Amino acid sequence: MAAASKQESSDSNQEVHTHVAKKPASSLLALGKLFPANKTLDHAVRFLSQVRGTDKTLMVIQYISKIFVWYFLKRGRASTAQRIKNLSGPISDYRILLRYYGLLPLIQWMQYVDNNPSPSKLLLLVDRLQNICNLIYYPLEHIYWLGAHEVIPISMETTNKISLWSCRFWAAYVVLQFIHLAEEYRLYKHRVQSVQEQIKTADVKAKETGEPADKTMYKAELKALQAEKKGIWINTIINTGYLPLTVHWSLENSSFPDVGVGMFGGVAALAQFYVAWKST
């Protein structure tokens, strides 16, 4: 009896403990319940956890802030404009620091270009020229930043010259990119024409045999080509946004307004943000 009583007491205690363990937490502390599951939030966390996502987000803020500075200055709110400038400066520095590892993926890309077949000789030539531009641009930008922040002993005159030359090689890259995009579009049209001819051939064969043509593969190819065309146009928008900026920063005395930098840079930034967001 004692053993049975002890067992019942143990079972009773287990039930009590079980009941206590299942008691819901206080609603005042359960802050997570205020935020329901959200796919956009999950996407944003993935996006911002990558260097690329962080860079594109800061890029949008950096360039759009220039438009706000212009806006507030036009309305006589100089103090507000200055506070926005105070934010823009550190963002620019941080983005340059993020690019300090840029030579590593560039070396990988150079290896890929020279060890894999290219769609055309022109694309191969442009890729190699662009790699040379970047191989000079990145170190110059790094030296400029270190000199501007007095990390290394370089005169301000030398620092400014280094900045100009780094931007000139960036501008050369941008000009070459227009040639690259034009060649990509030419190859795209050629492939579209080839697929359309294959579809016509399949239709003719279907009429001769009386069997319906299976166009699943052709439709998939055309869909992929449409995505490629979209990518070409988006990259053209990005490059168009960069062109006036790189020319402006390549000149010793440029009259290009800062709000123009914000507008063209903002277009490039938003387009790159869109591409990075979609690919995450």
Image: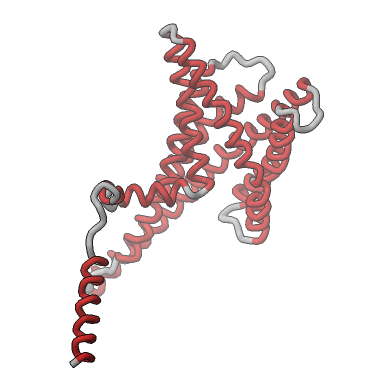
Residue 189 shows in this picture: no
What is the residue that sits farthest to the front in this orientation? Answer: 2
Residue 13 in the image: above or below residue 277: below
Q: In the shown orientation, is residue 102 left or right of residue 91?
A: right
Q: Image point 47% across, 24% down: which residue? A: 65
Left or right: 179 with respect to 43? right
Residue 83 in view in this figure: yes
Which residue is rendered at x = 59% and y = 56% of the image?
118
225, above or below 208, in the image: above
Relative depth, front residue between 134 and 18 = 18
Residue located at (44% from left, 40% from top): 273
Q: Is residue 182 left or right of residue 275?
A: right
- In the depicted view, which residue is nearer to us: 231 or 67? 67
Q: Is residue 225 above or below residue 143?
A: below
As rendered, which of 110 and 61 lies closer to the eye?
A: 61
Taking the view exactly as shown, the residue that stands out farthest to the top is 76
Q: How is the image coloured?
A: secondary structure
Instruction: Check the picture and name the quadrant holding the N terminus.
Output: bottom left
Residue 218 position by quadrant: bottom left
Expressed as whole percent of the image width and height from the top left, the position of residue 252 reads 69, 18
Q: How many marks?
A: 0
The x, y position of residue 242, in whole percent, is 54, 31
Figure quadrant of residue 191: bottom left
- Residue shown at the point (26%, 56%) measured from the top left: 25
Task: Please tell me whether residue 129 is drawn above or below residue 211 in the rendered image.
Answer: above
